[in-house]
């Protein structure tokens, strides 16, 4: 069976790979897509003509459509691939189309299958110069399918949330947010679900990323709802905890991982922020090795987790605490935020913020590392 792929790209795949020849020419592929989107009701021949050969006279147009249909049937290997004369239909027994399957899955209420089928925007990157009506039609189809895809992801997320499967719901909301990263409503819903799943640090991290994207792409402050929700999540841990060491109610040696520090804000060509933040992580790691009864996860293992590991990933490494944070460029230098997180429940037990100059690397690294080690030794101050 042939496969017509329209989501994320446009191609016709056979048993041996992509179909070549006349059937792979852009205008012939456009004919095939128009017929496929007609589904069982079919696509009028006149519509194909008006969208793809708008400037041709009647005779020229009829010849162009007839030649395109002949070439498609020949190169696709069967006359029955396209049925009809005045109303054209794609034979679903010969050609499988991802967009048609997407529609079918939605009509059957199979949201998970629909989400799996949607691998990208409809005809993403496909352009057909000289056919503005086709371009407008494709844009309308693209927007409508994307809207249905977004509704599908939200239905899956809300269904999981109703069942109190918050980890599953968070996964769907993350995918929804990836599709529309500047949508404040979606960002807030993602944060709420992450917090409900126990990943409050992930929720706050999502807020920071959203804030950075809005600032970079729109040159605007983040939406009030997202900022307010992030503040609420932070306040769920008393501010006084900043000056207190982590709870030692768990028996046995504690295990800690130092994660890669995130980088936010504008970049400076004269400074490598990643190199600076990696140096900070290395200094903290060295300081923690001197804390009694503290097992420190190897740097390679911690970095393999990435900057945003799930609580489940941390538990698999038997990690009880995590050091994480971010480095942000400011007008005058750098702002470094460092947090100590309890991995079992995903709650913050201590955090601190340091403003420094761009040239204060080694001294600042040592200062922050000493503070973290002091807290883990049971020190009570900042």
Image (cartoon, rainbow, N blue to C red):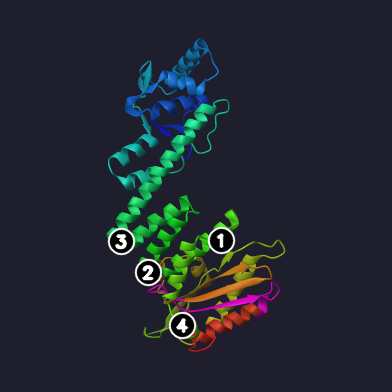
Circle 1/circle 2 CB separation < 8 Å: no
Residue 103 relative to residue 298: left or right: left
Indicate whether 315 appears above or below 176: below
Looking at marks 3 and 4 on the same chain, the residue that comes earlier in the sequence is marked by 3
Q: At x 45% / y 54%, what residue is drawn?
A: 177
Residue 98, by quadrant, is top left
Q: Which callout, 1 or 4, points to the residue nearer the camera?
A: 1
Report the magenta residues as a range. Answer: 341-363
Decide which of 277, 179 is in the foreground and name it.
Answer: 179
Circle 1/circle 3 CB separation < 8 Å: no
Decide which of 133, 364 is in the foreground and name it.
Answer: 133
Which residue does the numbered mark 1 point to in the structure image?
221
Instruction: Determine the secondary structure under disc 4.
Output: helix
Residue 221 in the image: state x and y as whole percent.
Answer: 56, 61
Label 2 vs label 4: CA separation? 19 Å
Q: At x 51% / y 25%, what residue is drawn?
A: 27
Looking at marks 3 and 2 on the same chain, the residue that comes earlier in the sequence is marked by 3
In the rendered image, the quadrant that contains the C terminus is bottom right
Residue 146, by quadrant, is top left
Residue 339 in the image: state x and y as whole percent.
Answer: 51, 75
Label 1 vs label 3: CA separation? 32 Å
Decide which of 165, 211 is in the foreground and name it.
Answer: 211
Q: At x 42% / y 19%, what residue is drawn?
A: 45
Label 3 vs label 2: CA separation? 12 Å
Which residue does the numbered mark 4 point to in the structure image?
241
Q: Is residue 148 visible?
A: yes
Task: Tell which residue pokes out farthest to the front in this image.
Answer: 224
Is 354 a magenta residue?
yes
Decide which of 268, 93 is in the foreground and name it.
Answer: 268
Indicate whether 274 appears above or below 320: above
Instruction: Determine the secondary structure under disc 1.
Output: loop
């Amino acid at each position: 069976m042939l496969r017509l792929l329209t989501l994320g790209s446009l191609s016709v795949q056979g048993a041996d790979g992509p179909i070549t020849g006349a059937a792979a020419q852009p205008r012939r592929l456009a004919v095939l897509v128009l017929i496929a989107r007609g589904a069982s009701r079919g696509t009028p021949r006149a519509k194909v003509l008006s969208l793809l050969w708008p400037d041709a006279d009647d005779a020229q147009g009829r010849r162009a459509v007839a030649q395109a249909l002949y070439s498609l049937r020949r190169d696709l290997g069967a006359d029955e691939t396209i049925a009809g004369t005045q109303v054209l239909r794609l034979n679903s027994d010969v050609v499988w189309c991802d967009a048609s399957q997407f529609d079918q899955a939605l009509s059957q209420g199979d949201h998970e299958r629909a989400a799996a089928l949607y691998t990208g925007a409809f005809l993403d990157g496909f352009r057909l110069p000289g056919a503005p009506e086709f371009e407008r039609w494709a844009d309308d189809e693209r927007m409508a399918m994307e809207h249905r895809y977004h509704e599908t992801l939200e239905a899956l997320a809300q269904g999981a949330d109703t069942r109190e499967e918050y980890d599953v719901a968070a996964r769907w909301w993350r995918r929804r947010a990836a599709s529309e990263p500047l949508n404040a409503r979606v960002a807030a819903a993602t944060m709420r679900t992450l917090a409900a799943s126990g990943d409050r640090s992930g929720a706050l991290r999502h807020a920071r990323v959203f804030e950075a994207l809005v600032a970079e792409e729109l040159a605007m402050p983040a939406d009030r709802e997202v900022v307010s929700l992030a503040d609420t999540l932070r306040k769920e841990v008393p501010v006084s905890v900043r000056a207190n060491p982590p709870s030692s109610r768990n028996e046995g040696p504690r295990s800690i991982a130092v994660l890669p520090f995130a980088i936010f804000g504008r970049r400076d060509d004269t400074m490598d922020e990643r190199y600076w933040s990696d140096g900070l992580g290395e200094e903290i790691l060295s300081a923690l090795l001197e804390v009694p009864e503290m097992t420190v996860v190897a740097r390679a293992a911690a970095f393999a987790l990435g900057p945003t590991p799930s609580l489940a990933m941390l538990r698999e490494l038997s990690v009880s605490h995590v050091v994480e944070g971010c480095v942000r460029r400011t007008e005058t230098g750098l702002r470094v935020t460092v947090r100590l997180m309890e991995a079992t429940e995903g709650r913050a037990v201590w955090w601190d913020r340091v403003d420094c100059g761009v040239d204060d690397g080694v001294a600042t690294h040592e200062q922050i590392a000493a503070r973290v080690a002091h807290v883990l030794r049971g020190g009570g101050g900042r």
